[in-house]
Image: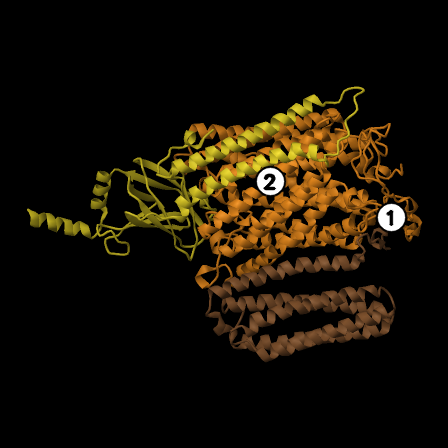
Chain colours: A yellow, B brown, C orange
Amino acid sequence: MIIQDWLAQVSTYAGSIDDLFALIGVLVGFWFIVSEGVFFWLLYRFRAKDGVKAEYITGEEKHQKRWVSWPHYLVLICDIFIIYGAVTVWYDIKQDLPSPDATIRVIGQQWAWSFVQPGADGELGTADDIATVDELYVESGKLYHYQLEARDVMHDFSVPVFRLKQDAIPGRVITGWFEPTTPGSYDIQCAEICGIGHGVMAGTVIVQTPEEHKAWMMANTPQVRDSISIAANTAR
Amino acid sequence: MRPIANTRDVTGVPTGRLAIWWVIGSEIVIFGGLLASYLMYRLANPGWAGHAAHTNVVAGGFNTFVLLTSSLFAVLAHQAAEAGNGKKAAKLLIATTVGGLIFLTVKGFEWTHEIQLGYTITANTFWSFYYTAAGLHACHVIAGMIVMLIVAAKARRGVDLHHVELIGIYWHFVDVVWIFLFPLLYIAK
Amino acid sequence: MAVSVGSEPTAHEDHHHEQSFWSKYVFSTDHKVIAMQYMATGVVMGLIAGFFAYAFRMQLAFPGMDVPGFGIVTPADYVSLVTNHGSIMVFWVAMPVLLAAYGNYLIPLMCGCDDMVFPKINRLSYQVFLLSAIVLVASFFVPGGGFGGAWTAYPPLSAKAEYNLTPLGSSLWVLAVALEFVAFLLGGINFITTAMNSRAPGMKMYDIPVVIWMLLIASILFMLSVGPLIAAAIMLLFDQNLGTAFYDPNRGGDPVLWQHLFWFFGHPEVYVVLLPTIGLTADIISVFSRKKLFAYRTILYTAFGTGILSFFVWAHHQFISGIDPRMAHIFTVTTLLISIPIAEMMFVYIATLYGGSIRFTTPMLWALAFIGEFLIGGVTGIFLGASGADIYLHDTYFVLAHFHYTFFPITIIGFYGGITYWFPKMFGKMMNETLGKIHFWGTIIPFNFIFIPLFFLGMAGQHRRIYNFEHFPELATPGLQNIRVFATTALLIMLSFQLVFFYNFITSLRKGKKAGKNPWKANTLEWTTESPPPHGNWPPSELPSVYRPPYEYSHPDREEDYWPQNVPN
């Protein structure tokens, strides 16, 4: 009945979203069971019986209204807990951006994802950027900022195991963050309908250990590859 | 064949007047949505002032004057109808309609000129709003004129004199919408 | 209160003349006929939308199969099917059946008058509505096929044919929706003025049946919220067809504007369809538990509160759509506040049962099922209104299951509750109770088996509007696929049980037991006239007057357990 039973948690904030879900589940679950319980009990208790006339209760008097208003105040208290939880989780994930170890660009278009990572210099928009399509290679334990763009229509960058989701809006660049924890390869889905190819707009995020990631960077940095070999030659 | 339901007035407000106010209520949110969108865009795009400079304030101002005058005729028509003078009310309503016609004619010249200069509905989002908002308003003017002529034809025969008031209320509303459109589209530069 | 029925003009002799088929059933201005027209159109549209659901659920359970009666579901078919399933169910089933059909049928009858105040506007309203339905259905057959950009129609996808690949379908869709709104604006004028101004002599504010109050509040909500979307639809039509750039970010527009205008209407719209069902549930529960409604005034206040709050929650649909993250806090608070009046309303309904003498007739079962099922829809909404949790749940099947747990009780249960309760009045015959109960259980049980599993699929991260999950390794597992097959099977069972209803409907029409004026021993005014009521509802000299509130059941001063509103003492 909780999210992590269905899907692994692979980012630092996945746990807090799942905990919020569980908190809400407990609070509303309680009210749900109480309401349905009372409801079915009343249906059984006051089923029509021969010769028994129904009572005449207006419900307008104070001692009667109490039966509705007290539960109702308790619901309000539960709401306050939920609001507190929701606001803090939201603040941590969407509003407050911790400083990044790296920044990547994520671009949605009909119907593919492209990703741009900084090369060895750690900066986007330079010659050693690494561009990939539909596959995002990241390093576990490293905090990433993403700059999300869309080329044509609305898309939504969703990585369920990260509990990450953000609409991509043409004409805007939206910045957010994530920090992967466990190496592995996971789904990226588009979570905003983007035309007939919406169902094939799949991507993969490959979370690598620092060593793997370093090797991948080496192997895929286009221009730096040459300079590396030069450096290796001079060292020799 | 008027249903009995139509003759009752539990709230104390005649049914026709109640209905016209609800129509206006729903119209206000239509124009409200359009103008709120325009304002949001306008605030985000200070450059639009340059486009607004190409609108013809004199023509717009004259049209404002024409509409206000026609509203005055609508008020006078209501007075005449209250006094039971259907013929006079009909004449005044026709005067109101003529006001609407002048408004549309001026508008026609304005738009022709602007389109000739290349300021079409697709020129820029300012002009898109300009034609959409003013066009929607013009549709209301035309609809109002048609209904007004029907009401006038009936009033001349002394039939349904209370409709004179209702079309008057609607006309004032159309007028008020223009009072909002004129400064927003023409004057704010 | 002085009552002088005789003072009302009796211009109604011509009510009883012979009418041709056309003027009686097609171009009628009688509110009851117009109600039937709305209901029939709504049911036909519902069958179409149900067929769509069948086609795309089959595709999800058995990807690539040749669906019997439809064929292969291509990706373009799939998005078009889900888009139009949603659009039809909200705009062409829920709205016409709940608001227009029940509104048209009940407002004049329960207010004790002969017709709507403006019968011709009423007829025009239906004609425009019918036109909108025809335009929508036509859009499925134009080159390129029906619109496939979701019922929310977010631009730029909906604005440009090069993106959505349905040049005609998308324009016709917007046009149909706009026409539908015009129809309901015209209808709304009648609902509001009739309920406000034309009530029977003696019917004061708190003597109005709850269902009438709810129809009135729903109409007002609709009229005050739909405007921005009409403006938005005009702009979208211009973007599609004239080449303007209201929503085109490359030329100075902003696509998010549409979302704000859409949801400013979209959320009140939920209450526009919810309130009529809430209202008719109140009437049914009161009648079949033989109880006065608990805290009648509280129900009204909660409905007002919900209505007002519903204008301030729209951005909870847009938490992750790039709005300023600080806005999310405000909308989380307002959204959770809405749980207060709705919870209170549910508590009041449950409290009404206390001390009752509950009869489990078919309409009562539907009304009770509404409460039981809507509670699930209500509590799961909290997860989505809480911004933090919505980051994960947004656009997943959890959302889908949640709103089907609201819309299904509202639309389908509301429709069946109303039709089984007022069938004797509408057609003068009783429906078969046994068949009614078979249909009830055959609908309710599979309904839960369709949508409970979808909550779990949503928690597993399955997103909406994807025609085939084979491209997503996490979703293509056999375990999840079994859940999909299970849900689809339940849908097939539920759909097949609907045949029982239609069979029952037709046989009861032909051979049902005669109903008489008041088969349920109910208090409200519609039960004081013939079944079915004649044109004009009552003979003009016998229009009822009202002496008391509508829910005086089991009053201690009275021998019988009901006390009709029109009986002087």
Q: Residue at x 63, y 26 (%)?
A: A38
Q: Chain of mark 2?
A: C
> In the displayed structure, would residue A10 be above or below residue B18?
above
Q: Locate residue A145, reporting x and y percent.
A: 33, 48
How many numbered marks are there? 2
Q: Nearer the viewer, residue C224 or A34?
A: A34
Numbered label attached to residue C340: 2
Q: Quadrant of residue A35?
A: top right
Q: Hey, which residue is sitting farthest left in the picture?
A: A236
Q: Locate residue C260, reporting x and y percent.
A: 53, 53
Which is more N-terminal, label 1 or label 2? 1
Alpha carbon distance from label 2 to label 1? 51 Å
Q: Chain of mark 1?
A: C
Q: Nearer the viewer, residue B12 or C246?
A: B12
Quarter of the image for the C terminus of chain C: give it.
top right
Q: Residue at x 83, y 72 (%)?
A: B80
Residue C69 visible within the image: no
Numbered label attached to residue A90: none
Q: Are marks 2 and 1 on the same chain?
A: yes
Q: Hey, which residue is sitting farthest top in the picture?
A: A50
Q: Locate residue C372, reporting x and y percent.
A: 63, 30
> Which residue type carries mark 2?
Ile
- Circle 2 SS class: helix
Mark 2 or mark 1, whichever is nearer to me: 2
**In the displayed structure image, the side of residue C58 where residue C361 appears, left or right:** right
Q: Hey, which residue is sitting farthest front in the picture?
A: A63
Decide: few, some or many residues near mark 2? Use Cα within 10 Å; few <14, some 14-19, many ≥20. Answer: some
Numbered label attached to residue C19: 1
> In the displayed structure, would residue C248 be above or below residue B118?
above
> Which residue type carries mark 1?
Gln
Decide: few, some or many residues near mark 1? Use Cα within 10 Å; few <14, some 14-19, many ≥20. Answer: few
